[in-house]
Amino acid sequence: MKSDLSQLSELIAHFMDERDWGQYHTPKNLAAAIAVEAAELQEIYLWRAGDDPCADKREAIEAEVADIAICLLNFCNRTQIDLDAAVRSKLAIAAQKYPAERVRGRREKYDEYPEFDTGSGGSEDPVGGGS
């Protein structure tokens, strides 16, 4: 049985194919579209108190979140990225960098913790990557 994410991905691919929009959906354009849609979501929260849930804008928030998800899944379709696998891999890396028992309730980057030590005398990234 396919996951909900796989089904959504196929639905988006079918929607785009029916409209012949693939010709415009280069990785560069889709990456830009993700950023633009994320900015539109951020704009809803602009100049509001930090803890304001923007309940009066719920419909607009949901629409922007959907736009971001559509663009992201479209990007993954186009670049043949398995989003489920990529997220699971990234979470495994983050779990190594940020063990819950060490970082719970703290906001610093992994190499800013006083107890951070790679054993090499420096503050290199222990698992590679960077982000």
Image: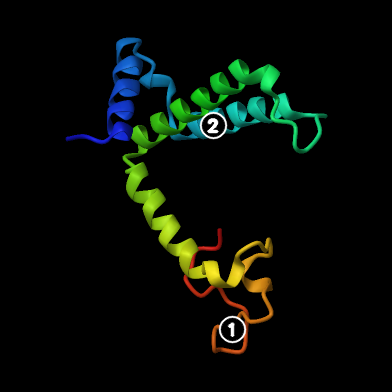
Circle 1: residue type = Asp
Q: Which of 91 and 53 is in front in this view?
A: 53
Is residue 110 shown left or right of residue 71?
Answer: right
Is residue 24 shown left or right of residue 36?
Answer: left
How far across and how far down the image is residue 116, in percent? 61, 79
Q: Which residue is drawn at 37% across and 53% down?
A: 88
* Relative vertical location of residue 101 with respect to residue 105 in this rendering, above or below: below
Asked whether residue 27 is in view, the answer is yes
Q: Residue 4 bears which disc, if any? A: none
Give the mark nearer the N terminus: 1 vs 2: 2
Q: Nearer the viewer, residue 38 or 4?
A: 4
How far across and how far down the image is residue 14, in percent? 29, 18
Q: Which residue is drawn at 75% across and 31% down?
A: 52
Q: Do the residues labelled 1 and 2 touch (CB within 8 Å)?
A: no
* Residue bearing mark 2: 34
Q: Which of 105 and 61 is in front in this view?
A: 105
Q: How crowded is mark 2: few (under 14 residues within 10 Å), some or many (20 or more)?
A: many
Where's the N terminus, which quadrant? Answer: top left
Circle 2: residue type = Ile
Helix, strand or loop under label 1: loop
Q: Residues within 10 Å of mark 1 (few under 14, many from 20)?
A: some
* Relative vertical location of residue 93 with respect to residue 58 in this rendering, above or below: below
Disc tally is 2
Q: Residue at x 54, y 71 (%)?
A: 101
Where's the C terminus, which quadrant? Answer: bottom right
Helix, strand or loop under label 2: helix
Asked whether residue 98 is in view, the answer is no
* Residue bearing mark 1: 117
Chosen colour scheme: rainbow
